[in-house]
Amino acid sequence: MRKILTFILLAGLAGCAKENTKIVPGIVPNTAKQEKVVVVHPNNVIGEVEPIYLLPMKSPFLSRIDTGATTSSLDAINIKRFERDGEKWVSFDVENRETKETYHFEKPLAKRIRIKRIGDDEHRLQVEMDVKMGKEKFKAEFTLAERPHFDYQTLVGRNILNGRMVVDVSLSNTLK
């Protein structure tokens, strides 16, 4: 009986070896020369540029993923501070440059923060936004800045990435 079980186990292993397919995680470089490699990317691995939805807007923004940025940033225009029921609020407009979809937001002011830059520091207003990345919807804080000369209208920083996603800069547009 023992010889039969050993034979079955060895035959099964030999059958697997004939396949000549190796599955490796997407973040491990392919060092195999003659093997066919199937790259598997876990759902939480994203690339250097990914789409993000600023809800309730219908069209996504291509966003630069920046692991060096503490807080995410958003290109906003017509930024105005005002008071509502004794609380500090901010109104601003967001226009998707690609689709021309425009939306007017009014949000409570979360805080005013200082952005450290070479030469001059900059002060920005920060608000909490409803966002969707991939299949996940959540709230995240964004600083508001006029970014007309930047390639990407949103920058996703560590406040969104931490504990949620891993970045592989060799990838782009992994989220649907």
Image (cartoon, rainbow, N blue to C red):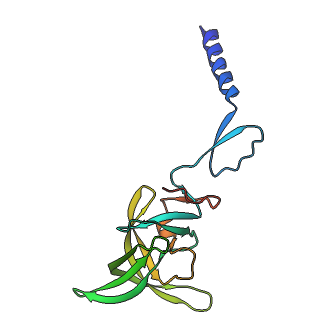
- Report the front residue among 176 and 73: 176
The quarter of the picture where residue 32 lies is: top right
The quarter of the picture where residue 23 lies is: top right
Q: Residue 74: give x, y in percent of width and height.
A: 47, 76
Q: Residue 11: give x, y in percent of width and height.
A: 66, 18
Residue at 67%, 35% in the rendered image: 21
Numbered label tally: 0
Residue 92, placed above or below residue 54: below
Please state if 151 lies on the left or on the right of 37 as rendered: left
Residue 85, placed above or below residue 25: below
The quarter of the picture where residue 125 lies is: bottom left
Find the residue positioned furthest to the bottom: 120
- Report the front residue among 163 and 39: 39
Q: Quadrant of the N terminus?
A: top right
Residue 2, placed above or below residue 55: above
Residue at 49%, 84% in the rendered image: 146
Residue at 63%, 61% in the rendered image: 169
Find the residue positioned furthest to the left: 85
Please state if 86 lies on the left or on the right of 175 as rendered: left
Q: Residue 149: give x, y in percent of width and height.
A: 57, 82
Find the residue positioned furthest to the top: 1
Q: Residue 76: give x, y in percent of width and height.
A: 44, 81
Residue 21, placed above or below residue 51: above
- Report the front residue among 19 and 98: 98
